[in-house]
Image (cartoon, rainbow, N blue to C red):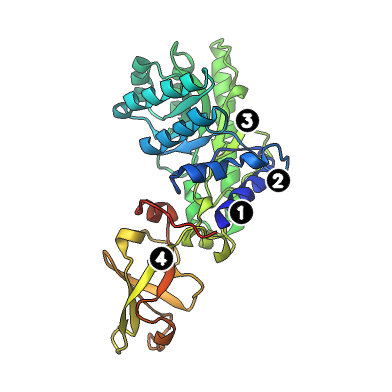
């Protein structure tokens, strides 16, 4: 099905572009079954596909899920996971407990990495003796991440010089790619991302050399990417130990149809099934109502506009949404095109494509899988 095909396509694209390692994010599907499909264990060793070397999780429950898989399988990729948002002190006891559980089950092979982008985080992490850190850099998205300039170099040096902390890698998120549709601009964006990382590595290397540090900068793992940018990242700059960390690619959504990461609705892997509960054949509405609204899809926006879309019906638009309902009408410049009510009987169902599948999926406790 689409989920499996999307996972394989991401690995194939990474390998083709010279990036041999993939570290999938689990935040979109949040399931054990999804992790196992992302891991691609059955195709391990296939040189045409990037190796899946670990995972990224953004919440403590997601992290716990991957840790349980690590304790069960006792092998990568389940035993190497990054907690992918900047660490805060309130989460450390739980994460430390999971870390001890994982390392015990894997005889020291398992590892949880935490994200640092502030000197205060490095200071309080010393108290917990958290071992492995990824330094998050801001390479253009301007959300999380420390700058690639002096502040970033100083923080990296602080971690490197610590007797308790270990700098394992650099982490960037190419989140600004979600607003890019032009393939040329997307390529420029990923090239800039890589150039800034390489510049940071060179500056850090020079800084450490001047202080007679023996730390090997080339040993760092470099984790980059996002779903819309994953097909544009390559390794023309020969960045060592580079890996991609997309997440949304397992389901895709309307946003990714717009960016071009998802080539057609056939690759969409997650929908919201909704039932038609209203017909309004009057001059003011000329529309139908379905029983899925903001609590099922969220009101996340996309460049195309509208709240969601109906699978296989580009002639329709979901133009209005409330908490539990969405209104659907025909696309029309003058707004008077008759709605084909006979094609959508009361009580029948439609599949809705979310604007952002990561958010829509989080609205539900279970999936119904159609294979």
**Dot placed on the residue nearer the N-terminal end, 1 or 3:** 1
Question: The residue tagged with tag 4: helix, strand or loop?
Answer: strand
Question: The residue tagged with tag 1: helix, strand or loop?
Answer: helix
Counting every numbered tag in the picture gives 4
Cα–Cα gap, marks 2 and 3? 16 Å
Residue 314 appears in view: yes
Q: What residue is drawn where x is 40% and y is 33%?
A: 64
Q: Which residue is mark 3?
A: 241
**Dot placed on the residue nearer the N-terminal end, 3 or 4:** 3
Cα–Cα gap, marks 1 and 3? 26 Å
Q: Residues within 10 Å of mark 3 (few under 14, many from 20)?
A: some
**Dot placed on the residue nearer the N-terminal end, 1 or 4:** 1
Q: Quadrant of the N terminus?
A: bottom right
Question: The residue tagged with tag 2: helix, strand or loop?
Answer: helix
Location of residue 235 by image quarter: top right
Q: Residue furthest right?
A: 47
**Dot placed on the residue nearer the N-terminal end, 2 or 4:** 2
Cα–Cα gap, marks 2 and 1? 16 Å
Q: What residue is drawn where x is 62% and y is 23%?
A: 218
Residue 273 bears which disc, if any?
4
Q: What residue is drawn where x is 34% and y is 60%?
A: 296
Asked whether disc 2 touches disc 4, contact meaning CB atoms under 8 Å apart, the reply is no
In the depicted structure, whether residue 49 falls above or below residue 127? below
Q: Residues within 10 Å of mark 4 (few under 14, many from 20)?
A: some
Of the pair 188 and 253, the residue shown nearer to us: 253
Q: Residues within 10 Å of mark 1 (few under 14, many from 20)?
A: few
Q: Nearer the viewer, mark 3 or mark 4?
A: 4
Q: Which residue is mark 2?
A: 16
Q: Which residue is mark 1?
A: 5
Q: Nearer the viewer, mark 2 or mark 1?
A: 1
């Amino acid at each position: 099905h689409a989920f499996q095909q999307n996972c394989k396509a991401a690995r194939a694209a990474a390998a083709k572009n010279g990036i041999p390692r993939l570290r999938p994010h689990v935040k979109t599907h949040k399931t054990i079954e999804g992790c196992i499909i992302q891991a691609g264990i059955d195709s391990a060793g296939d040189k045409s596909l990037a190796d899946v070397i670990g995972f990224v999780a953004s919440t403590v429950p997601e992290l716990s899920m991957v840790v349980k898989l690590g304790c069960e399988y006792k092998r990568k990729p389940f035993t190497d996971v990054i907690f992918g948002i900047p660490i805060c002190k309130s989460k450390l006891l739980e994460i430390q407990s999971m870390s001890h559980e994982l390392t015990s089950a894997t005889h020291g092979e398992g590892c949880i990495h935490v994200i640092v982008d502030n000197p205060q985080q490095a200071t309080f992490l010393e108290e917990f003796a958290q071992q492995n850190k990824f330094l998050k850099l801001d390479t253009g998205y301007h959300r999380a991440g420390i700058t690639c300039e002096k502040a970033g170099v100083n923080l990296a040096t602080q971690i490197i010089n610590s007797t308790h902390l270990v700098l394992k890698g650099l982490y960037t998120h190419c989140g600004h790619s979600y607003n890019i549709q032009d393939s040329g601009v997307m390529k420029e964006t990923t090239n800039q991302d890589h150039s800034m990382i390489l510049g940071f590595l060179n500056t850090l290397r020079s800084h450490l050399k001047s202080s007679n540090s023996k730390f090997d900068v080339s040993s760092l793992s470099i984790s980059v990417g996002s779903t819309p940018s994953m097909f544009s990242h390559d390794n023309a700059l020969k960045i060592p130990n580079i890996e991609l960390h997309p997440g949304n690619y397992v389901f895709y959504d309307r946003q990714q149809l717009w960016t071009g990461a998802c080539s057609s609705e056939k690759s969409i892997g997650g929908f919201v099934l909704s039932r038609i509960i209203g017909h309004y054949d009057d001059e003011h509405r000329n529309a139908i109502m379905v029983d899925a609204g903001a609590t099922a899809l969220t009101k996340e926006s996309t460049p195309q506009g509208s709240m969601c879309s109906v699978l296989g019906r580009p002639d329709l638009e979901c133009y209005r949404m409330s908490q539990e309902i969405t209104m659907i009408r025909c696309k029309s410049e003058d707004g008077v095109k008759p709605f084909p009510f006979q094609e959508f009987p009361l009580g029948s169902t439609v599949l809705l494509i979310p604007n952002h599948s990561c958010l829509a999926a989080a609205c539900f406790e279970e999936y119904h899988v159609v294979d």
